[in-house]
Amino acid sequence: MRPLLEVMDLVKTYGEGEAETRVLKGLDLQLETGELAALLGPSGSGKSTLLAILGTLMKPSSGKHVMLGEDLTKASDRDLTEFRNRHIGFVFQFHHLLPDFTALENVIFPSAVRAGRETWAARERGRELLARVGLEKRMDFLATKLSGGQKQRVAIARALMNQPELVLADEPTGNLDRGSATQVMELIAEINQNEKTTFLISTHDEKIADTCRRRIRVSDGLVE
């Protein structure tokens, strides 16, 4: 059975000549369907660059990036955008909710962008997702009226809107208190278990990493 995602000999350099900096140095990594994995490593180790490449937000300088059997290193920018919208969800440290939109409007936004309009089916799925993350009574609240933990739960629901196979989370609990962080990780673990959605969570928090079933540690541009 093939892995959900595989990168081989991944290299990413910035700049040229004397200013050239190699951030990823031939990195190899596989993720299986249904994994809940923590991505660990010190600042400057290459974690953020790796997440950007896995999320098709950035192309590697060389190497191979395959997901769902598709070689993404050969894909055009347009094809990468379509692939990303269909198969990958994102949760960031700063939730990036649209402040003038309600919780429900924020959740269905990815679907509206993909379809070119807001549909009844999208609203129904958005409501279902918000109920699943415990916000059925906050659906019509503006994002500015939600607590930090509630905003991050909206962000998780939004990441799941298009039913992605992979969700990439970059410090998703970094701005939350311990209680809210625990709730968010319990929610992620529940979704991972019930939906078999693969999660890769970048974190500096060992307690968050302990809730994941696999640890992937990046150091000096390579997986240890």
Image (tube, grey):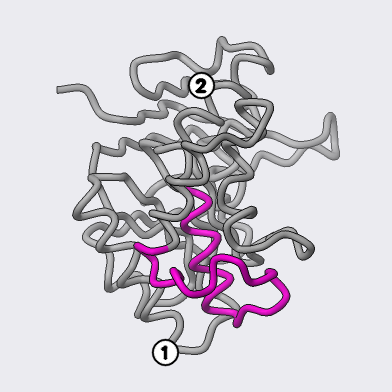
Q: Is residue 37 left or right of residue 55?
A: left
- Residue sitting at 61 percent across and 26 percent down? 115
Mark sitting on residue 167: none
Q: State left or right for residue 10 relative to residue 96.
A: left
| x then y, percent, for residue 54 | 51, 36
- The percent coordinates of residue 73 (x first, y second) are 55, 17
Q: Kindly give the residue lying farthest to the left in the view shown.
A: 1
Q: Which residues are magenta?
A: 131-159
Give me the residue at 56% from left, 56% from top.
45
Disc 2 target residue = 63
Residue occupying the far front of the picture = 120
Image quadrant in which the N terminus is located: top left
Q: How many marks?
A: 2
Q: Of residues 23 and 97, which is closer to you in this image?
A: 97
Asked if residue 85 lies left or right of residue 160, the reply is right
Q: Is residue 175 magenta?
A: no
